[in-house]
Image: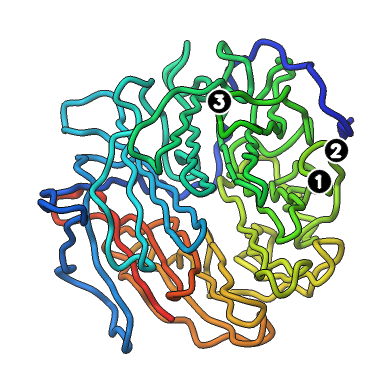
Amino acid sequence: MKQWMYAMTNDMQSGRKYGLIVSLKLVCQISLMISSFSPGPVLSTEAPENTALDPANNAVYAKSTLGLYDISSFDVYVDQEIIHLIASGKRAAHNKHDSIRYTRSEDGGRQWKSPVTVNESLPAALASRGNDVQLAADGSHLVSLWQTEGEFPTMGPMVSAYSADAGQTWKRGANPAIDNDGSQAHIDLVADWKGNFHAVWLADPNENGYQGLHYARSIDQGKQWSQPVTLDDSTCSCCWNTVAVSPDNKLAVLYRNTAPRDMSLAQSLDAGLTWRHASTVGDFQWKFEGCPHVGGALKYAGTDNIAQLHSVVWTGIEDKSGLYHLSSNDNGQTWSIPRKLGSMAMHGDIAARNRNAVAAIWNEMEPDGASIFYTKSEDGGTTWSAPKRLTEAKYSATQPKLVATKHGFLALWTEKNNQHSSELAWYVFE
């Protein structure tokens, strides 16, 4: 039986490995490469050789590298109109361990600072798309979380790193899960409006044979973490989780449940001290014994409407399989009727510039592979523009992310180049 924990507890015990369930997973490993550093503080970029885009005025489409040969994951985070980017990958083809690089943009994603290595003296990253290295920021304070290799090759504990100088130098923090002998994965991380950092992850600390959703917070910018609590003791094993913070400092976590295998919303109204189950986001009643390896996306609309949430969720239910947009005007208590995006869409993300300007992005499954499309709404998600193609299927672009700033929307994804290594591509649009 699932048990909701309404206060901070100290019941985390030694972890154990868990088996991955055969699923619908789209296997697309990603990499980033950098051919050179610019002599100044700006990250060098290159124009794409081939593109399906016909960019409109003020649109920017480019590709770049981060000094790495084979990138396995990335994350992007916006704080005070600054876009922070972190990525993990091998420095060279013969390397066995992943390095982590950090950079940022102060103009909406058009230019980037030279990358900094995060884990020069810290454990290597064990990351892949869907189990990405994570980043959050509050002013000059940054925190990153990632999984590293433990007793078994494909699993291990979390590593925490923090920076107090805007990402120039990094130090190791405590593991939010405490359990350094266990395995924690599918992490997400956010900073609230008071400068506290909040983390969620999947783990099986009590060796039950299944994963649960766990949470901890840091009130000292990532140095130490609170005792972890269990938000749901039985969840889908391999789907990513998403945590969001409202303009009035409420927390919401979107994750995939087990029975049915729909997306659930957990909420805290007191900055993580107590939690409750709020709702099901897309009540499809999908009964499936397995893990689809597809999480969801969750964003608040902006400071002008503190209770408005937008989400995209994926379901595999027969005759309704696909990616759907839903919105809530009461902080996730109730949701709109699901509206399907694309045809055979999955791996979606969503962002909002304000209560009206919303954009969604996704992978579209096509005969030749996966491509990326996006759509925009100017009325808070009531109506949507015709989807626009960003990539062709032959480039194996996968799992796009989307953020919003005063400069516009920034879409990022990884795609294969002619050398069959993955690199980062991005598209800035209004």
Q: Earlier in the sequence, mark 2 or mark 3?
A: 3
Q: SS at mark 2?
A: loop
Q: Residues within 10 Å of mark 3 (few under 14, many from 20)?
A: some
Tell me which residue sits at (16%, 26%) in the image.
Answer: 94
Read off the residue under disc 2.
Answer: 274
Q: Position of residue 335 (x, y in %)?
A: 81, 68
Q: Residues within 10 Å of mark 2 (few under 14, many from 20)?
A: some
Q: Amino acid at mark 3?
A: Lys
As drawn, the label of residue 268 is 1
Tell me which residue sits at (77%, 61%) in the image.
Answer: 284
Read off the residue under disc 3.
Answer: 223
**Distance from the alpha carbon under mark 3 to that under mark 1:** 22 Å
Q: Nearer the viewer, residue 103 or 124?
A: 103
Q: Amino acid at mark 1?
A: Ser
**Image quarter (top left, top right, bottom left or bottom right) of the N terminus:** top right
Looking at the image, residue 346 lies above or below residue 212: below
Looking at the image, residue 34 lies above or below residue 57: above
